[in-house]
Image: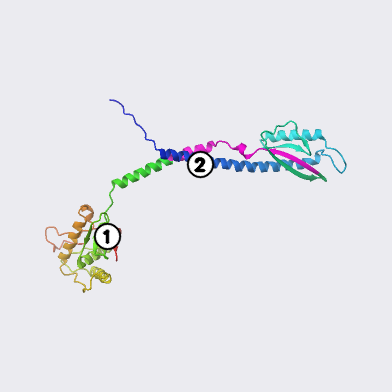
Amino acid sequence: MRNKKVYFKSNPLIAVNVLALILALQCVAIVAQYFSFQSSIHQAVDNVQRRISLDSAFLDVGNKTLNTPVNQFAIQRYMNRLNGNLKQNDYPVIVKGIQGIETSTESFVHYPSETFSRFVNAEQEILVVLRSKTPFSALTFSWTSLLASLVISPLFFISNKTKKTQKALEEEIPPSPKLIINLQNKTISNGVDDKVVTLQNKPLCFYTALVKYCIEYSDTPLPPHKDVPPELLALANKSFGRLIELGHTKRKRPDFNANLDKTLSEIRAALDELFLSYNEEKEKYYPPRAQGEGSRSKQHSYALPPIKEEDIEIIGN
């Protein structure tokens, strides 16, 4: 038996997203490197200027008042020693010159930016020239950003797989029907297809009341051989009053105790038509029929099976 090879399908969109993520994190890292190095340069310049200012009291930089010249040899030796320490500590700044004396032992190829500063010490003005690196010289490829990209990238695959799974489930699971009673146009519908069934005033009002009653009194039986409970009658009369307000009828309120079997039969017939393709879901909204002993059986109840408020929607209530 030949082994079947397994091929993994590539997703160009995921690849583009991953590449964009890597580039975005690299840009963030480069910007952070730029501003961080620029800040370190300013701090280094300040530190070197402060160091020279403190050492200037011991430097033979000459004195215009006394007309003494600058000790070139001492300045050169001081700059060489100071620059050596700066390089050893990886400073982005070196000293080019002090009081017009420039160092002859340093190359400034990697220090293109020049900074001038002047300060006075013992009535002597001292000029210092510093050379520093540019922030661009510190911009490098960030391995941390690449590692972060590799850690985050699997989330794209998980998200894509989750969306596909959710879409597949939505396609596989059909929408669940829901009873919609519309008092404005005297119809009932299931909320899934376009099927709409029209009910007469009496069965419509009684069924609307029956649904509300069974939600509120879920454990109360409704035997057909007894009168309709006052609470159910009140709800039915309220629904009929709403039909009057909507302009559907001007007749007096019907007797909802009379011809109860006929009213229930009309309701069942409408539900049979409405939930023709949803027999299982229909049971939730269907007033049970009597089994074997007739509709006036003492054991029979036309109360709806357990039904909740979220199972129905009443428009124009």
Quadrant (top left/top right/bottom left/bottom right) for the C terminus: bottom left
Residue type beneath disc 1: Ile
Colour option used: rainbow
The crowding category of the residue bearing disc 1, from other C-alpha atoms within 10 Å (few below 14, some 14 to 19, many at least 20), is some
The picture places residue 271, in percent across and down from the top left corner, at: 20, 58
| Residue closer to the observer: 291 or 112 | 112
Q: Circle 2 — which element? A: helix
The picture places residue 185, in percent across and down from the top left corner, at: 25, 64
- Provide the residue span drawn in magenta: 125-154
Which mark is drawn over residue 180?
1
Is 206 included in the stretch rendered in magenta?
A: no
Residue 160 horizontal side relative to residue 300, left or right: right
**Splitting the image into 4 quarters, where does residue 61 fall?**
top right
- The residue indicated by pointer 2 is 24
| Residue closer to the observer: 146 or 257 | 146
Q: CA distance from mark 2 to mark 1?
A: 51 Å
Count of numbered badges drawn on the protein: 2
Residue 160 horizontal side relative to residue 57, left or right: left
The crowding category of the residue bearing disc 2, from other C-alpha atoms within 10 Å (few below 14, some 14 to 19, many at least 20), is some
Most distant residue in the left direction: 293
Residue type beneath disc 2: Ala
Most distant residue in the right direction: 66
Q: Residue at x 57, y 42 (%)?
A: 31
Question: Mark 2 vs mark 1: which is more N-terminal?
Answer: 2
The picture places residue 76, in percent across and down from the top left corner, at: 78, 33
- Residue 215 drawn above or below residue 147: below
Q: Circle 1 — which element? A: strand
Q: Can residue 81 be spotted in the picture?
A: yes
The picture places residue 223, in percent across and down from the top left corner, at: 18, 64
